[in-house]
Image (cartoon, rainbow, N blue to C red):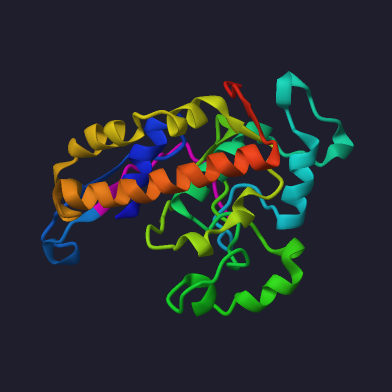
Amino acid sequence: MSEVFAFHLDRILGLNRTLPSVSRKAEFIQDGRPCPIILWDASLSSASNDTHSSVKLTWGTYQQLLKQKCWQNGRVPKPESGCTEIHHHEWSKMALFDFLLQIYNRLDTNCCGFRPRKEDACVQNGLRPKCDDQGSAALAHIIQRKHDPRHLVFIDNKGFFDRSEDNLNFKLLEGIKEFPASAVSVLKSQHLRQKLLQSLFLGKVYWESQGGRQGIEKLIDVIEHRAKILITYINAHGVKVLPMNE
């Protein structure tokens, strides 16, 4: 159900990278219990079976791409740069989004940046030992649209609200030197909670499934706290905050 929250957060931050997601009840699905319904987009590029990505990248290659700042300021990358068609700013948006929700299944599929639980996919699939060779770890769920390869689409946005502060995955921010000004502005403002409440209230099924306003407020508490941690990180590491409208 965190996919629904992720969709609302994405829109409020002005990222607009997730597919529309709502919560619905259906007798033939989960015995009538609420479940997320995600509007699929036929324009998404075809993905590989192993990484569910339209472009294959390892962690090491990804870190090199971040240094190249591909397509930034309209600059066409040199052939030897190794750049993909994805714009540099897209990685900043993804890192910010994934950190707030602690989504690890894109940038940290082996769970190298935090202590996973037994039920986490990386533990179930025996991937944790591969952290000894992080550079070769494959990124997953890196998806573009066929007609718009410069921009990413965030899919499979399973977030974790129960990750404790001392176990947050800062690996998701590694190599990121800029964040989108519009999103950071929302995080810094006093209106994040109000905007999330107003947006989430429109989804009656999801609202009620989380225990009404009291339950929703607890989820927002987590995001607000992580936002403060992220702002502290930005200030401590001298990360730039830039307009990212390309």
Residue drawn at x 37%, y 39% is 9
- Residue 198, percent from left and from top: 23, 32
Residue drawn at x 37%, y 45% is 6
Q: Is residue 115 at all visible to an observer of this figure?
A: yes
Residue drawn at x 24%, y 48% is 216
Q: Which residues are magenta?
A: 36-48
> Relative to 52, is 29 on the left or the right?
left
The image shows residue 187, relative to residue 156, as above or below, that is above
* Residue closer to the observer: 45 or 11: 11
- Residue 85, percent from left and from top: 69, 35
Quarter of the figure that contains the C terminus: top right
The image shows residue 17, relative to residue 73, as above or below, that is below
Residue 41 in magenta stretch: yes
The image shows residue 132, relative to residue 236, as above or below, that is below
> Relative to 150, is 18 on the left or the right?
left
The image shows residue 69, relative to residue 233, as above or below, that is above
* Residue closer to the observer: 173 or 8: 173
Quarter of the figure that contains the N terminus: bottom left
